[in-house]
Image (cartoon, grey):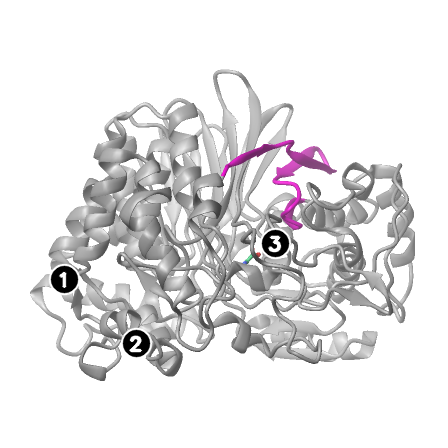
Amino acid sequence: MNRNLISGLFFAALTFGGASLAQETADTVAPEGASEGQVQALTDEVIASLEAKMAGIPVRSDNWMVAAAHPLAVEAGAKVLRAGGSAADAMVAVQVVLGLVEPQSSGLGGGAFLVWYDAATGTLTTLDGRETAPLEANHRLFLDKDGEPLQFFDAVVGGLSVGTPGTPALMEDAHRRWGRSPWPGLFQDGIRLAEEGFLVSPRLASLVEADSERLSRFPATAEYFLPGGEPLQQGQRLMNPDYAETLRVLASDGSAGFYGGEIAAGIVSTVRNAPGNPGVLSGVDLALYQVIEREPVCAAYRSFEVCGIGPPSSGALTVGQILGMLNDYDLAAMGPEDANAWRLIGDASRLAFADRGRYMADHDFVPMPTQGLVDPDYLSERSQLLNTEGALTEVSPGNPEFDHASNWADDVSLELPSTSHISIVDQYGNVLSMTTTIENGFGSRLMTNGFLLNNELTDFSFKTHSNGVPIANRLEPGKRPRSSMSPTIVMQDNAPVLAIGSPGGSRIIGYVAKSIIAWADWDMDVQQALSLPHLVNRFGTYDVEQGTSAEGFLDSLIELGYEVNPRDLTSGLHAIEIGEGLIGGADPRREGIALGE
Ligand code: GLY
């Protein structure tokens, strides 16, 4: 295949979303005006990986593998792994490039959760790098003067929604625990790309265009994303010298150079002086920020243990509840073509989301029945509710075992899709699964020092009480907002067999659960499992991936009693299966790839 055609394939891959993969591939042509630089930007290994993804074939390797949301970020990680670096080292290199080339989804101004399997000790560790609510914030932050919740985007855009970033501290913590390569070298690719420039992808260009009004509200953000008042164009070379400078500080001073000094001052001043919507983040919040090691949450599914991060994420608990309830049903015998399988998956998910809305929040602030929620006996009891002919007519939270008196009202919070997922296996057998975010696409839209600031605080429930009963996920000073991020490592016989995760707001949970079912029950390889069209049910309405074979279920789902909602479902799953060798997959709906050797 010639390189112009391949370049077209790259752009077709990047623009895939709703249209059929086959159609996109058949229509492959070099993008109009494709420059030599665009063509040369693709190395042979990236081309091979893109071809594999477009053909629905997983990538295979013997020693190491990295899968993430943009080829340049994956290449940066691959370079570190090839040179003998660990998965933690590679993650730092991937994250700093993602913050440049996919700035709308994750970066230094956001937070992340990380799951680590350590080959030397055979143990799992989970790290919480979630943002914290500023100490000057209070539970009324997102209420208007009449005590009514603000409109979502009135809260998101500006300083009010910005929590203390956790990603730089998480990168440093992971490197300190598990790094093998010198810290400064991990920033080299990010610095080079920020200084020399990178080509704006079609996805970034289209998201900038769609969000241009909000991005135009703040001068630093507008100058970067809307130079000369016009949205960035696909294929345009974009440089970010401020980001390069920030990376140089991090490389030389570590996270201390981020949580103090000029970068910290820039963050605080940007948040507190945001025109129209100033926030309350302070230098004290930044100085006090800590990564927290959490107890992993694991749920039994078939012969596997599905493990991830506990509260403040609801991810592992909710994925674990869905799978735990389905343990009693033979999905393998039903197969992916049976509408009854999707009834069971959809209603298990609804029951899990009912528990999530009632019980799940930052358990450093509210008591939570964490173990009770994934207790096999409790889930087996809940799963009996699924033993019906049609869709459940009533869904309410259960009563997991809990040694603490509690009376919570159901959560009211809106989570829109954004975020990014990184899966890495290194040559030493360590496995990393990390989901990373600035929350909404382009976060708070505030930019400082070359990166965007998160709007993570809008993951709290805006309402604090319902009928006088408090909501567990309400905002409190220092608290971490509940997340849906579900970085997962699936274990079998005490060894890791799959690393997986996705962006997608609260649909992350459905994307990850479906992919594990497709892989574990329906014998699909990781690429097939990720590519399988989505059907996601959180609160009753069945979201069905538009323009895919999933639409074939619309009539059956309506007959079963569901309201259906055909729509784009832009997950960004990245997964690596660990067996004799490594088998990687990347979501065809987004820009990412898997590379290995
Ligand atoms: N803000 C996305 C999540 O944490 O789930």
- Whether residue 348 can be seen here: yes
| Contact between labelled residues 1 and 3, with CB atoms less than 8 Å apart | no
| Quadrant housing the N terminus | bottom left
Answer above or below: position of 213 versus 290.
below
Quick check: 582 left or right of 121? left
| Quadrant housing the C terminus | top left
* Tag of residue 39: 1
> Ligand 1 near label 3 (Cβ, under 8 Å)?
yes
Q: Pointer 2: residues within 10 angstroms few (<14), some, or many (20+)? A: few
Point out the quarter of the image occupied by ligand 1: bottom right
**What residue is disc 2 on?**
27
The span picked out in magenta is 290-316
* Tag of residue 481: 3
State which tag comes first along the sequence, 3 or 1. Answer: 1
Q: Nearer the viewer, residue 171 or 198?
A: 171
Q: Position of residue 229 (x, y in %)?
A: 22, 83
Q: Nearer the viewer, residue 135 or 460?
A: 135
